[in-house]
Image (tube, helix red, strand yellow):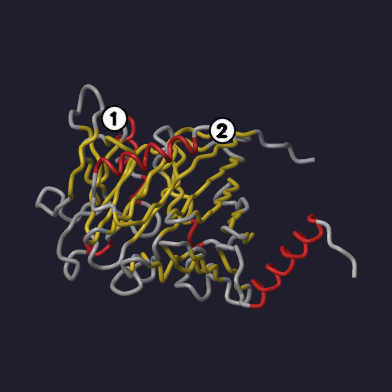
Amino acid sequence: MMKSTPLTYLAWVGAAFLLAASAFGQTSEICRWDAAKKELTFSLSRLSGVLNCDLSASHGKSHHFSKVVHTPSNTLVSPDVGGMVKAGLLNYFRVVTRGGYLTELRVESATLKPTQDGITFIWEPTLRRQAKVTAQFTFRDPNIIDLDLRVETLAFYPGFEILLSAYMAPGFDGGAYVAKQEFGPNEPEQIRIQDQPMIHGLYPFFPRDEAGANLLTDGRHQKGRFPWRMAIGRRYGLPMAFFNQGPVDVLLMGRPEDVYAVGATYKGDPDTDGVARHRSLYLSLFGEDFQPGEGRRTQMRMIIDDFGSDPKKHAELYQTFLKDVAPVPRSFTINPVQ
């Protein structure tokens, strides 16, 4: 009988471990892709859910999060019941320009590229939307959904915008971070958004600056499907908003250079008020003039856990996000077509 060397022995042990893990169905993959259903099931240590990618079977959405659960508390986060069941938790909504409407990415077919920890959507240019859009979703333990967005424009688009939307299950209430002073240093202050006569029926948005406020009211959102109007609030203190139910918070944040406004619906009567029924967060992305042949890139992050609406903890999570995305360039070169 041959005597195994230490290296051979370790290799044998490693192979046996992998074989045993395979036999019991244990893998290191965060995501599992079902090609037949076009569904991506993700499982993190504190968060699980399904990303439905079949336009014909997921309420007409190309990306539609459902069955999203904060597992330690067994709290349903996605709007699987109620008036927003067709919207799903998180998706790319409108693509608009200054005074104009191009499309809704969430109802357009995309090329899908699933991986072990996420999936990439590629929307090729169309006559109506002369821009290629690539959106990468990455799931990170224990509670993070990261989004990386690339845009390659083939035409001139003034004030180009992609609107990211997120919808919550019944029982969640919203909040945002605004500047304590409208003029002066931008010190963030957490506010909770309640229905009141002045904003009733409107969608509250908090711009980064006066230029952002002007974009929100230039008529871009009164065109296409679902025309709506915004109630322009104070400038945002952080490009981040949240919804919470008890101790469980759902935070959505983006890069300050690329988020020109943050939206969060108010708390009201969901049975009689469509705005309150949405329970939604929004990030208005870019809002800048895009030139033909320009490549732009930005990142967003959703974090779900029991933070108890603590402003200090929220600020720490946001600073971690900024550090993570700081090395990523915000523009890239588009290779010319051969």
Q: In x, y percent, where is residue 219? A: 33, 44
Identify the mark at residue 271; answer none if there is no mark: none
Picture coordinates of residue 189 (x, y %)? 20, 37
Between 75 and 7, the one nearer to me in the picture = 7
Q: Amino acid at mark 1?
A: Glu
Secondary element at image label 2 = loop
Residue occupying the point 18% across, 71% down: 271
Using the rendered view, name the quadrant where residue 231 is placed.
Answer: top left
Furthest-left residue in this view: 197
Residue drawn at point x = 84 percent, y = 62 percent: 4
Q: Secondary structure at mark 1?
A: helix
Q: What percent of the width, then of the height, locates residue 34?
A: 60, 73
Crowd class of label 1 (few under 14; some 14 to 19; many from 20; radius 10 Å):
few
- As measured in the structure, the alpha-carbon distance from the residue carrying label 1 to the one carrying label 2 is 26 Å
Q: Is residue 104 above or below residue 333?
A: below
Residue 265 appears in the figure: yes
Mark identifier at residue 329: 2
The quarter of the displayed image where residue 255 is located: top left
In front: mark 1 or mark 2?
A: 2
Q: Residue at x 38, y 36 (%)?
A: 319
The residue labelled by disc 1 is 210
User: Taking 143 as reference, is 159 above or below it?
Assistant: above
User: Closest to the observer: 240 or 121?
Assistant: 240
Q: Is residue 173 left or right of residue 317?
A: left
Residue 75 x %, y %:
31, 68
Residue furthest to the top: 184
Mark 1 or mark 2, which has the lower sequence index? 1
- Badge 2 amino acid: Pro
